[in-house]
Image: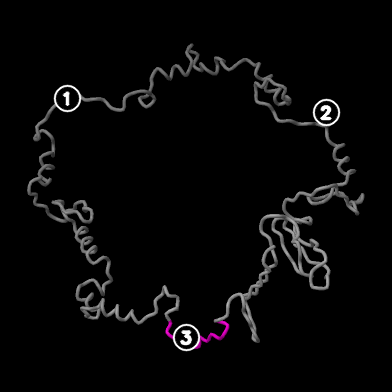
Amino acid sequence: MANTIQLKRRVSGVAGAPAALKSGELAHNEVDNTVYVGKGDDGSGNATSIVPFAGSGGFLALVGTQTVGGAKTFSLVPKSGQDASSGPDLVRKSQVDSLLSAKAPLASPTFTGSPTAPTAVAGTNSTQIATTAFVNEAIAGFGAGDMAKSTYDTDNDGKVDAAEVADAAPWAGITGKPSSFTPSSHSHSIAQVTGLQTALDAKAPLASPALTGSPTAPTATTGTNTTQIATTAFVAAAIGALIDAAPGAMDTLNELAAALGDDPNFATTVTNALAGKLFAASNLSDVPNKATARSNLGLGSLATQAANNVAITGGSITGITLDGGTF
């Protein structure tokens, strides 16, 4: 485990530096996200000033959103041969002016060459620009029309071809027809219906049926106690509930007795055995000889020292945490 060193810190409240720091002591204020350091020494170890030196709160961040106040200037500006060529580059004013001069104004632009625009939908009547394709399509609409006899009356019989098709409508093409038709009422005896008596003879009667083969029935819900037929699945479930999914070695009374050591006073035996154990809720306070127990565990005097008054002499420590506290 790596060692951990925590600076003096403030996670909420007032922004700014702490009121006092030792010379060279660090402090981090999460309110303004700035790291401060104590500078100078007044002779007793206290810093004579506290200055910020890191953190996005007091310095420009390389990434992320940040608000920068006041007017900023650059000591070195891009030269004439350093025009911006990618997103992060600074843009020179002359480069922006050159780009703007090649653009058309929104008000009364004068285009040259062969300017293009999206073609409006046929019939559009607005201020949208009309392309040559839009004009040609509009002119084509003034033709002879789409009701030419040679197209719609190919057999020259004076009737539109589509109307001739309607003279003989197929059954599948008729809409709104009923899906079924109610038959006339009638009655027949069993003998008049082919195979009906044979089918009835193959069915079991409701009273005292003599079933053959492997008849099945719905399995009743576990715990049902009625005259409903019990299936093999119902019986298996009832037996399973009785042994409560006990393992194979403990699903009989003899196996349960063997597991208890054939001890009729098993509960008393276990209670007496537990009486000699430490009580968990006592958190080791019921250890008879604590000094001997610490020695057996390899614990020295450090185990008996208070957390706020620990004295360590010699040896090495790993995985420690040094906490500078808050301000």
At 68% from the left and 20% from the top, the residue drawn is: 125
Mark carried by residue 212? none
Residue at the top extreme, as displayed: 158
Closer mark to the observer between disc 1 and disc 3: 3
CB of mark 1 within 8 Å of CB of mark 3? no
The residue identified by callout 2 is: 109
Residue at the right extreme, as displayed: 80
Q: Considering only vertical position in the picture, is 139 above or below 2?
A: above
CB of mark 2 within 8 Å of CB of mark 1? no
- Compare marks 2 and 3 and give the one earlier in the sequence: 2
Residue 195, image quadrant: top left
Instruction: Give the Cα separation between the discs numbered 2 and 1.
Output: 86 Å
* Front one among 264 and 256: 264
Q: Secondary structure at mark 3?
A: helix
Mark carried by residue 185? 1
- Residue stretch in magenta: 287-303
Q: Is residue 283 visible?
A: yes
Check the image and tell me how it is coloured: one colour
Q: Residue 91 lies in magenta, yes or no?
A: no
How crowded pointer 2 is (Cα within 10 Å; few <14, some 14-19, many 20+) is rated as few
Q: Secondary structure at mark 2?
A: loop
Residue 59, image quadrant: bottom right
Residue type beneath disc 2? Pro
The residue identified by callout 3 is: 293
